Amino acid sequence: MKPLSSWPQTAREKIVGVFTDIDDTLTTEGAITSDALQALQILKAAGLMVIPITGRPVGWSTPFAATWPVNAMVAENGAVALLQGASKKNQVHKIYQQDLAVRTHNFQQMQRIAQKVLKEIPGTALAQDSAGRETDIAFDHSEFHTLTAEQIQQVLQLLQQEGMTATVSSIHINAWVGSHNKWQGAQWILKQLTGRDLKQELDQWVYVGDSTNDQIMFEHFTHSVGVANIRRFENELKHLPEYITTQERGAGFSEVANILLKSHT
């Protein structure tokens, strides 16, 4: 990972938008910091698209999607997007990748599998935001509850044996039924918003993240940045971001916004 300061200005000048993780990328101790919120504002003011994409649930994401200066927010690892209402302030509407019948069937299956994990792997606990989840399940490993590396691997193995897609974020183990993920979700939402194909303009976008569930984005994006706390997962990542900030979490995201702003003013 190269220092963010080495990102060439000629490359930064082409950037039209930012995809970003939320937890431990925009947030610090579970809340967005003032510098990260200001960073979102200056990016939007400079004319860049801003789209957070997270493993957090719809219920948790909705108030932030309604009030943050973003173009959209993609929740539950690509399954659902939250769009700000055009007619009413602080109102959002949801669009899904799966239809209602599929979501209903999958939800029932996931609840069964979640209970199996809790029963068969001692010490596991559902994420506290589980009530707001519609298309996935999540187990806490670092937010309010701690799991060992061995326990995390046991959970992943069981989920995968049940045919689920599973990833590990900085705080949760997320699992769902379907082929969507953050990368596929990013392509989907850009197509929904603009009709454009992300794969055809990757040199115009940057992704910012902090953990193992971001590595699919680091793998595919031409420009990618890890906030400094990504060092925690460095040995577990097969695909590292191209650049790294000097500061952690929201302060690191603010670094990204500021260096982009210098190229767009």
Image (spheres, rainbow, N blue to C red):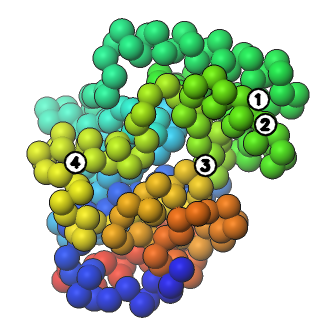
Q: Residues within 10 Å of mark 1 (few under 14, many from 20)?
A: some
Type of the residue with mark 4: Leu
Residue 204 image point, x, y percent? 22, 69
Residue 169's disc is 3
Between marks 3 and 1, how big is the CA–CA gap? 15 Å
User: CA–CA distance between discs 4 and 3?
Assistant: 23 Å
Q: Point out residue 107 in the picture as x, y percentages from the top left corner.
A: 51, 15
Residue that carries the numbered disc 1 in the rendered image: 125
Dot 4 falls on a residue whose secondary structure is helix
Query: Depth-wise, is mark 4 or mark 2 nearer the camera?
Result: 2
Query: Mark 2 packing: few (<14 Cα in 10 Å), some, or many (20+)?
Result: some
The residue that appears at 45% across and 83% down in the rendered structure is 4
* Disc on the earlier residue, 4 or 3: 3
Residue found farthest to the right: 122
The disc label shown at residue 154, or none: 2
Which residue lies at the image location 36% right of the left edge and 9% below the top edge?
Answer: 101
**Counting residues from the N terminus, which is met first, the one under dot 1 or under dot 4?**
1
**Mark 3 or 2, closer to the camera:** 2
Contact flag, marks 1 and 4 (Cβ < 8 Å): no
Q: Amino acid at mark 3?
A: Ser
